[in-house]
Amino acid sequence: RKLFALPFIARLLLISLSSNHPKYHSKRSIHTVLEQRIIISIITIFTTPLLLLHLIMSFSLAAGGSTTRASIPGTNTANPAAPGNQRTTRPIVTGTSVIGIKYAGGVMLAADTLASYGSMAKYKNANRLVSINPKTLIGGGGEYSDFQALTTLLRKAALEDRCTADSLYEEDGSEECAREVWNYIRAVMYNRRNKMNPLWNDVVVAGFAQDKDGSTGEPFLGLVDKIGTAYGDDVLATGFGSYLALPILREKYRGDLEEGEARALLEDCMRVLFYRDCRASNRIQIAKVTKEEGVLISDPYELDTSWDSASFVTPKGEIEGDGGW
Amino acid sequence: QKQHQNMNSHMHTKGIIPRKKSKRMSCSPPPSTAKTLSLLLLVTTITNLLPSNNNDNSKKLSLFVKGNDFNPYQLNGGLVSAIAGKNYVILASDTRLTDGGYEILTRRHLASRLWSAADFGPEEEGEKGESVLGGDGSIVIPTYESTVPSLPFVPRANPLTAAATTAATKLSNVYEEGIMVASAGCAADCEALKRIIRSEINARAHWSSSSSPFQVSNVATLLGQTLYSRRSFPFYSFCVVAGIMEGRRGGGGVYVYDAIGSFERVAVACTGVGKEMLQPILDRLFVSSDSHTNKSSTEYSTSLPTDSPIRRDGKALSPEQQRVGLLTLAPPV
């Protein structure tokens, strides 16, 4: 706002300085209208880019709103719907868990294709596993619109990388590796959290980390949550999956898992999640990142489930039961 | 019109042909409208420059903002400690990352927990010939044996079990120079703090012409100032800084912090989750190297009268000894 005022101040000063009433004549006044106009235009030319930059920055995804509006965290909590104060306070359309595992050939992620509207299973064909560039895969739980915005931002950056690379044909080195994408997402999430306007997502990043000489290095699996906590491990899960799937994954994990074994393990975990997470569905997608082929995302398919387990047929919570699960 | 009248009056009084400026004067606005216009512009600019008035009554800041479901902090746990010796310092931390509740997010988190304050000199080689400091300054626990040429990755069997993690923590890295920082609390803030400090020090080391641009005391002050600069929205990060002190005193230097930047140099330090349990142990195990405070012979303190029912532990460090700073290891009781 202060930058907006600059052209006005400039004009103000010039008009007051250069008024051609005989009373205001002085030897240092600017006499010609042409000179006045030149000076005004120079000042506006220099300040307009700053103004435009300020406008663009305050509307960008990574900036997350103007700093003048959200300067003090905690104000306007009594009236969050006040005009000019837009902030994410709770997620509306949400995706549930994403689970990931490293295996011998690369990294594999699994997620269901459901975006819930509260307790309603509203969007049953939502893609929550997305490839950013041919080498990096991300999966997102939480607010689906924020995940879409984040995906758009990352894809824009990837396109820019491709278009400004040294060669259009050579693939290695110009694309961001998974570790770079993970670090970038951390910075975006942390910046938004500092403005108390988060992207309400837990994002899993899968791919390979790049070595110092630019060659593809070790498999990489990392997670960034909505306040910018960033960590990596061999097995990861978001949301409900961190409670139900992680113990299974940690128990069964080996460093030399085959692709089929890893996929079966992930499917088992998704089945457990469908049984016990009421915001999950059995229509899932599996995606993998390998060194040779890059990112491959499967079409959605439905898991077979069996509901004749004793604990489902005769729930223990009934009067005759022992009160257990 | 007023201007024109003045012109006419000029003409009548002076009886000269009108000046050439009359043509230019008709282009510019008359002074009365110029004055009102400038006044209007002045008012609008001043109102734009004033800070906006918030309608909300409360401007209280708290760690947990009321009325908002979004909590910007998460206590990710961690216990960090450091001790200062005569010519060494030792830093230690755990590697567990929690979600603040019952969940363990990862058992091998070091990225924001224990890190080097800058990239000092050539990288130290670890046991396997790899750099033990990652690109972002954190310690790297090698998970893959890269010496086997046949397969690209030959990982250890199930590195996630507790046994494997204790084996990994036997890794000890000895550096000849360097300043390390260990921070616990909110991992997102610790990571952000790490990047700020490292970029400051790396930039200074890069552009500085002197051979040793940064000492431990400089890093300590920088960290204290950085933490205080966010006094209104703190970094929820409890730190210890350790390095070898320059100058006459020399020896190990350890500094301990709280989340808003108050710090002091101490002999033994710990902070984070469980610091209340660890600090008495550190106080008890390490005695001062100053000769006049040699307390190894007395089990109980002799400063109290002998018939006093109170028994004070004779081997524990007093606060004065903490501030003096240099310790030697004493065998544990």
Image (tube, grey):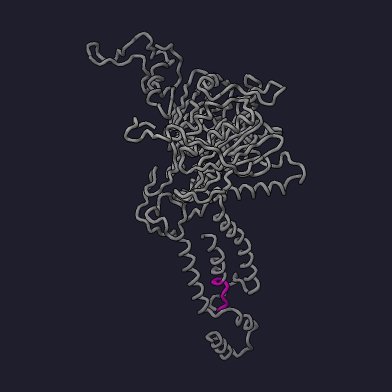
| Magenta-span inclusion, residue A298 | no
Residue A204 located left or right of residue A318:
right
* Outermost top residue: B297
| Front residue (pair B85, B82) | B82
Which corner quadrant holds the C terminus of chain B? top left
Asked if the stretch drawn in magenta spans residue A20, the answer is yes
In the image, A156 versus A288, the foreground residue is A288
Is residue B150 in sight in this rendering?
yes
Residue A96 location in percent, x, y? 50, 43
Residue B165 placement, left or right of B57 = right
Residue A15, position as x, y percentages in the image: 56, 72
Query: In this rendering, does residue B225 appear at all?
Result: no
Give the vertical position of B171 relative to A93 (above or below): above
B308 or A69: nearer the eye?
Answer: A69
Quadrant for the N terminus of chain B in the image: bottom right
Q: Quadrant of residue B302?
A: top left
In the image, residue A179 sits, relative to residue B107, either above or below, namely: below
* Percent x, y of residue B118: 58, 32
Left or right: residue B323 versus residue B313 is: right
Q: Describe residue B213's horizontal placement relative to residue B265 as left or right.
A: right
Q: Which residues are magenta?
A: A15-21
Locate residue B165, reporting x and y percent.
Answer: 53, 22
User: Nearest the camera: B39 or B74?
Assistant: B74
Which residue lies at the image location 56% right of the left edge and 34% below the top edge? A266
Q: How many marks?
A: 0
